[in-house]
Image (tube, grey):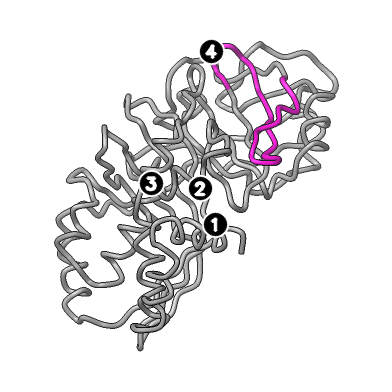
């Protein structure tokens, strides 16, 4: 509701009040809705909306906690999104994989670089892993599109009955007291984990406005079955987790769009997450709740986009 109210305020600033009332009186509420949707596709709206919002570690509508793991400095930080700011709750020492660099293969002793969910808490483990472990969703959709392998990347503790080396096989490990403190200060269901080789480069408001306006422009092209505009948002290097490349994706979408079906596409709980990577790209992971419906098909679930921001151009590298 707050976002809708703010959008209306922006609209009032764009139009003289009399013009806005005339738009409603002469053309109806549908034209007002079109103008609202038009505003959502502009950087100007989002720059205004984000004016007093810290987006250094992303933009979050349904996540409250951001974990940032710096492999080089062996430091784990926990931030909480509060009052449009990121409040640092903890800074802890950590250890990670024995080998430097991004993880690509099973058993390479490397900790992956990227953005991940914490999916569940494991207890009753071998004492080597401490009191419990938080499981990540490595490999994620983008990892799979790059043919990355491996599994079992956790945040866990230290052995209860013995000492251990100053590295892991790929997991992140904390002193047991720190692990317990970490869990007490967050809800892992509402958390994202960023793992970087060095420091995470802060996101600017201009970059975030670019990304948010992109989401609504891409959605509009999808909703209106504008295949040419829609495909322009995708990189020629696009690849799904199942290996489907751009050409096969294009052929499939051309067939779907040719039906010219009326579509309802709505996104909520939008989260835009900086995506550390070893490809030297400015990337973001977008996760949002999707409602999609046509006359013959309905889907309610999670939509993921992995995008590259290169200057003022955004390209989708993978999606799920």
Whole-percent x, y for residue 52 in the image: 58, 38
Residue under numbered circle 3? 44
Whole-percent x, y for residue 156 in the image: 71, 31
Alpha carbon separation for disc pair 2 and 4? 35 Å
Q: Nearer the viewer, residue 176 or 75?
A: 75
What is the crowding at mark 4: few (fewer than 14 residues within 10 Å), some, or many (at least 20)? some
Alpha carbon separation for disc pair 2 and 1? 7 Å
Q: Nearer the viewer, residue 132 or 232?
A: 232
Question: Element at badge 1?
Answer: helix
Which of the marked residues, 4 or 3, is nearer the chain's N terminus?
A: 3
From the viewer's perspective, tell me whether residue 24 is left or right of residue 315. right
Q: Disc 1 vs disc 4: which is toward the camera?
A: 1
Asked if labels 1 and 2 touch by Cβ distance under 8 angstroms, the answer is yes
Residue 241 appears in view: no
Alpha carbon separation for disc pair 3 and 2? 9 Å
Question: Element at badge 2?
Answer: helix
Residue under numbered circle 1? 6
Asked if labels 4 and 1 touch by Cβ distance under 8 angstroms, the answer is no
From the viewer's perspective, tell me whether residue 293 is left or right of residue 79. left
Quadrant of residue 87 within the rendered picture: top right
Q: Nearer the viewer, residue 18 or 157?
A: 18
Which of the marked residues, 3 or 2, is nearer the chain's N terminus?
A: 3
Question: Element at badge 4?
Answer: loop
Residue under numbered circle 2? 49
Alpha carbon separation for disc pair 4 and 3? 37 Å
Q: Which residues are magenta?
A: 70-91
Identity of the residue furthest to the bottom in this view: 295
């Amino acid at each position: 509701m707050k976002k809708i109210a703010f959008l209306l305020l922006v609209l009032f600033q764009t139009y003289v009040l009399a013009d806005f009332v005339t738009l409603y009186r002469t053309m109806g509420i549908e034209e007002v809705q079109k103008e609202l949707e038009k505003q959502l596709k502009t950087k100007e709206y989002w720059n205004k909306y984000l004016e007093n919002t810290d987006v250094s570690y992303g933009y979050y509508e349904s996540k409250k906690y951001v974990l940032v793991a710096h492999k080089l400095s062996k430091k784990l930080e926990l931030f909480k999104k509060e009052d449009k700011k990121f409040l640092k709750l903890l800074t802890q020492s950590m250890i990670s994989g024995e080998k430097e660099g991004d993880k690509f293969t099973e058993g390479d002793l490397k900790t992956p670089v990227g953005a991940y969910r914490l999916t569940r808490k494991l207890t009753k483990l071998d004492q080597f892993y401490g009191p419990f472990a938080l499981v990540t969703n490595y490999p994620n959709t983008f990892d799979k599109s790059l043919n990355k392998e491996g599994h079992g990347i956790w945040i866990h503790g230290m052995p209860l009955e013995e000492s251990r080396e100053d590295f892991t096989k790929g997991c992140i490990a904390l002193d047991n007291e720190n692990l317990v403190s970490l869990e007490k200060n967050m809800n892992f269901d509402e958390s994202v984990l960023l793992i970087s080789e060095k420091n995470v480069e802060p996101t600017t408001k201009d970059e975030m406005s670019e990304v948010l306006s992109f989401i609504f422009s891409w959605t509009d092209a999808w909703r209106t079955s504008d295949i040419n505009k829609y495909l322009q948002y995708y990189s020629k290097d696009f690849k799904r987790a199942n290996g489907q490349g751009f050409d096969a994706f294009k052929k499939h979408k051309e067939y779907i769009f040719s039906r010219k079906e009326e579509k309802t596409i709505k996104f909520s709980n939008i989260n835009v997450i900086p995506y550390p990577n070893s490809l030297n790209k400015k990337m973001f992971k977008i996760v949002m709740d999707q409602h999609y419906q046509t006359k013959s098909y309905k889907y309610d679930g999670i939509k993921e986009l992995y995008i590259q921001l290169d200057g003022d151009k955004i390209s989708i590298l993978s999606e799920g």
